[in-house]
Amino acid sequence: MTVSLNNLDATTVSASAHVDIGHAVRRSRQAIGYSVDELALTCGLTDAEITNIEQGVDADPGKLRRIAAALQVPVTTFLLS
């Protein structure tokens, strides 16, 4: 399945893709030394929202864009990992 920002939503992304995105978010966060709390503060999401994304429960495109901006990486980093 091809995942892009145009077709990324809860109805089209499988659970395995969510987990892969979550792992990519976690790796990116850890690579710059951010805790979940620090990332949440930087991107304006809650700790729970970050945790849900990292655990593969959520893959909201808007949240992924905010996280990517906070980590200063392209959002495709999360989709291509």
Image: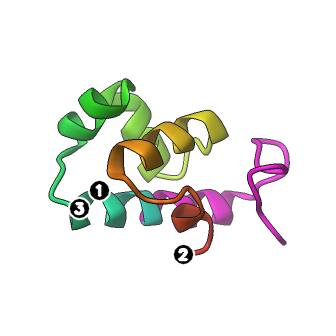
Q: What residue type is labelled 3?
A: Gln
**Residue at which label 3 appears:** 30
Which mark is drawn over residue 29?
A: 1
Image coordinates of residue 13 in percent, x first then y, are: 76, 54
Position of 7 relative to 4 (above/below): above
**Secondary element at tag 1:** helix
- The residue sitting at 20% across, 61% down in the picture is 32
What stretch of residues is rendered in magenta?
Answer: 1-23
Q: Residue at x 44, y 65 (%)?
A: 23
Q: Quadrant of residue 10 in the image? A: top right
Q: How crowded is mark 1: few (under 14 residues within 10 Å), some or many (20 or more)?
A: many
Three-letter amino acid code of the residue under disc 2: Ser
Q: Mark 2 points at which residue?
A: 81
Disc 3 to disc 2, how far (Cα)? Answer: 15 Å
Q: Quadrant of the C terminus?
A: bottom right
Disc number placed over residue 8 in the picture, else none: none
